[in-house]
Amino acid sequence: MTLEQAAALDAADPLAGFRDRFVPADIVAYLDGNSLGRPLKVTRENLVRFVDEVWGERLIRAWDEGWMQTPTTLGDTIGRVTLGAAAGQTVVADSTTVLLYKVVRAALDARAGRTEIVLDTGNFPTDRYVLEGIAAERGATLRWIDADPATGVTTEQVAAVAGPDTAVVLLSHVAFRSGYLADVPAITAAAHDAGALVVWDLCHSVGVVPLRLDAWGVDFAVGCTYKYLNGGPGAPAFAYVAAALQDDVRQPIQGWMGSADPFTMGPGYQPAGGVRRFVSGTPPVVGMLPMRDMLDLVEEAGLDAIRAKSVALTSFALDVYDAELAPLGVEAATPRDPARRGGHVTLDHPAFRELVPRLWKLGVIPDFRPPDGLRVGLSPLSTSFTEVARGLLVVADELR
């Protein structure tokens, strides 16, 4: 019945038509859209047009004709379409790692006299590694939250550890392994009650979970654009800096493109006003092009509809798990409550480490996360229910 159920869900899917907008691949199932989104057909056309007509014809003049403003103009689009952020608070530049370093350093320095940074042991390695480096560099102390993988970091845990010495709290909105969806407004409020600033990692939520950063009182956020925003491998990341903080914070990588007047090329650094000060080097213009196309698609579909499809896809994946994989000893590591679940499902079994390379050869493409997790990432606009069913049925067959 699994394939029949999937076909019925596909027939009733109001977003089904969007799948035709993506470049097709000769595979059985792509279950890794939360690591690298599929490219759009229109992106191929737009990249060719960019080379021939913009870069090729306008040459260096294009910097004055728009390229110089792309970090903030594209940032405003990301803010409006996906973040619930008013203009002037989001900038595109660098990688997630570099932007994390910038905003955490800025937040730490903005809380003079406070020396503690709160983070959790289950966060993505980049987040933990960057904060370990900042703590060593600035003489700060890391306060670790050891969250239950089944529940993720809770408001109560943050309230218990944050205190008068806490400068910064860094957490992920959606846990990269379990898919647990944290309570951003409640946790942010708890950190603020302690006088701390909060940095949210949105890598696994932007473009698939509606966000309300302004309304939630978020201070800083960082996210990548190659997952649900389909920016392509190595696409630049974005940073959100609340307007109320911008004139009082200073980022540590002082480059000419973040200065008040780059072409004065003066003897000393003066930061630009607003969020532009978080830019350092030359904007990665080519790397920004694909995500524009996906942002248009996200806006056309609507984030609420995308979230509804995401919940339906992950719920269906868990239904298939119950029927086909649980009897084989597989355990679900993802919350059952859709209100606490992001856009992916993680399934645990000791055989998955060696099984994933075989699945790839068979045209079923999830990813593996230690110690024994098969992560099923479901990008709503490019993934069908039938694709999910076929992929997980192959997993069951290979386990047998």
Image: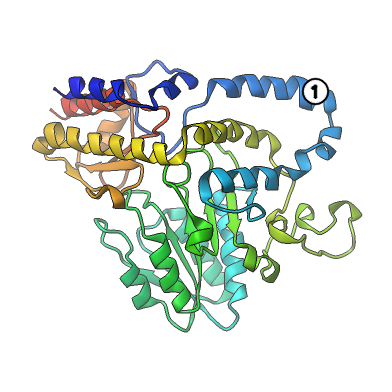
Farthest-out residue, top: 26
Can I make out residue 230 in this image?
Answer: no
Which residue is located at x 85 percent, y 65 percent? 268
* Local secondary structure at mark 1: helix
Q: Quadrant of residue 365?
A: top left
Question: In which quadrant of the rendered view does residue 377 lie?
Answer: top left
Residue at horizontal 53%, vertical 41%?
225
Find residue 149 and report its horizontal and vertical position in percent. 27, 57
Drawn side of residue 31 relative to residue 150, left or right = right
Q: Position of residue 359 (x, y in %)?
A: 29, 26
Image coordinates of residue 102 in percent, x first then y, are 61, 60
Please, what is the three-letter code of the amino acid marked with disc 1?
Gly
Tag 1 residue: 56
| Quadrant the C terminus occupies | top left
Q: Quadrant of the N terminus?
A: top left
Q: Depth check: 274 or 14 in front? A: 14
* Residue 43 falls left or right of residue 53: left
- In this view, the residue in front, 48 or 381, is 381
Residue sticking out furthest to the left: 327
**Position of 345 relative to 262 (above/below):** above
Q: Position of residue 126 (x, y in %)?
A: 48, 54
The residue shown at (51%, 26%) is 39
Q: On screen, 158 above or below 130? A: below
Q: Residues within 10 Å of mark 1 (few under 14, many from 20)?
A: few
